[in-house]
Amino acid sequence: MKIAVWLKNKVKSFDFFELGNSVILYYFFIFYFTSILFFFGVRGFLWENSVVYYKALFYLTLGLIFFAIGYYNRQTSSIAGRLPKFLKLDSEWDFKKAFWVFGVVFVLGLGIKILRIFGGVYSYWQQNPWFQNSPFYSLLGIFDWLSYVALIIAFTSYFYFKKNNDARYRLWQKIAWGTFILEMVYTLPSCNRTSVIMPIILYLILKSYFSRVTWQQIVIIILGAIIVVFPLGNACRSPEILRHYSLAERPIENIENSLTYAKNAGNLTFDSIFSRIDQFTVFSRIVEMDEPLLYGKPLLNFFISLGPPRFIWTNKPIISGGGDFGHRSGLLAPSVKSTVGVTIVGDWYMNFGVLGIIFGMFFMGMLFRLIYEYLIKRTGISFSGVMIYSILWLNIIKGMEDWIAPVYAGLVKIFILLLIIHYFLIKRKNENFTHSS
């Protein structure tokens, strides 16, 4: 009986956006879910000839176990408790300044959007060599996040004023939802599925910490968004896919025809989702290739990526190896100009083998625990803590499919940018702030 009560309380208080919980759920989703479907005989069009590579499955399970050990052990929490608090992340915001900070950040983010449109690099299929070869082009990746910061400031202010029954919440409500709608209107025509979902997740993170939403509601909203956005995104990128699934051959004329249409639409949805999130195939291919270990060479690219921007370091090496790996592994056709990330666990394996998975994932578990403890628990869920945490959360979850070095060098750069914005938002008095105030 006591165990049932304990389990019920744990489920009820489950924090979906706690970094370790999120990573484990996403890890399970991208590495295990298709294998489970295969086991039960479920096959989509894209996986008719697929098989489960059990050696890769074992290595992935090993990585998950050691990640959990690194994240949930008490020693990691103890280390987080001794980290210095000189960044003042628990300071209260000055909401008079927040309006002006929002305005500046919003305008700068809007400027980046306009620059992308007129620079010919708005969507993934657009190429503008002149603009992309510019030494300033690499800065866009960092400043793209300004629009999300504006969204965070707006919704944080809205939640704060509404909780305190301050009439200003109506103004911030309009600003917040207006910013949200603008973000969606800008992103939808680009056919970028991830970018469409990111504002939704940011809203849910803020609502989770500053208002009220259950993890069950979070799961339903995210899954609903994925089910709608992913097939539409595929159709947007490749309209011919509709013919492939017989969705554009003839109109629905009768019940039998409509049932066939619904089945084909279901197949399109299934394949669109799992073609995007299935990273088990990528990791399996890495294990099958059995190439010589790299012994940390790609990881050292972290320092190159973290180095001066290209307009200062004109001969800065290009460190992305996704295209080369994609073609070498056979995951990309020779004619396809795209990139394939090796996944976080795949990167550790390529560098140090099985020991890399064990110690690398254990280290990542500790690192993610420190991030969560420092930005959320130790700040008492402060506004700046959640602002920084939510942006890092998105990058970390997205980065689980990518190479380690560029993702975490980017995290450092974004963290510095967010710290600068944080210092413009806080009150100058040395006051400790908790969310309950």
Image (spheres, rainbow, N blue to C red):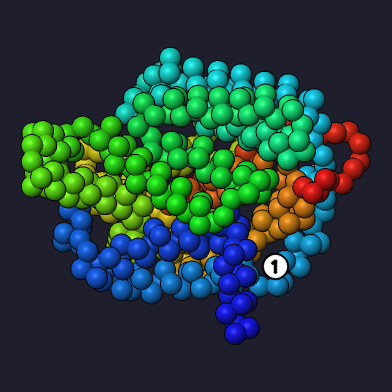
* Residue 92 position in % (x across, y down): 82, 39
Residue in the image at 75% along x and 65% along y: 79
Observer able to see residue 136: no
| Residue 367 falls in image quadrant | bottom right
Residue type at mark 1 is Thr
Q: Is residue 290 left or right of residue 167?
A: left
* Residue 330 position in % (x across, y down): 24, 52
Given residues 349 and 43, the one toward you in this image is 43
Mark 1 crowd level (few <14, some 14–19, many ≥20, 10 Å Cα): some
Observer able to see residue 391: yes
Residue with the mark numbered 1 = 76
Given residues 344 and 261, the one toward you in this image is 261
Residue in the image at 27% along x and 47% along y: 269
Given residues 171 and 46, the one toward you in this image is 171
* Residue 342 position in % (x across, y down): 40, 54
Q: Secondary structure at mark 1?
A: helix
Residue in the image at 46% along x and 58% along y: 26
Up the image or down, 381 lies above or below 93; here it is below
Residue in the image at 50% along x and 27% along y: 181
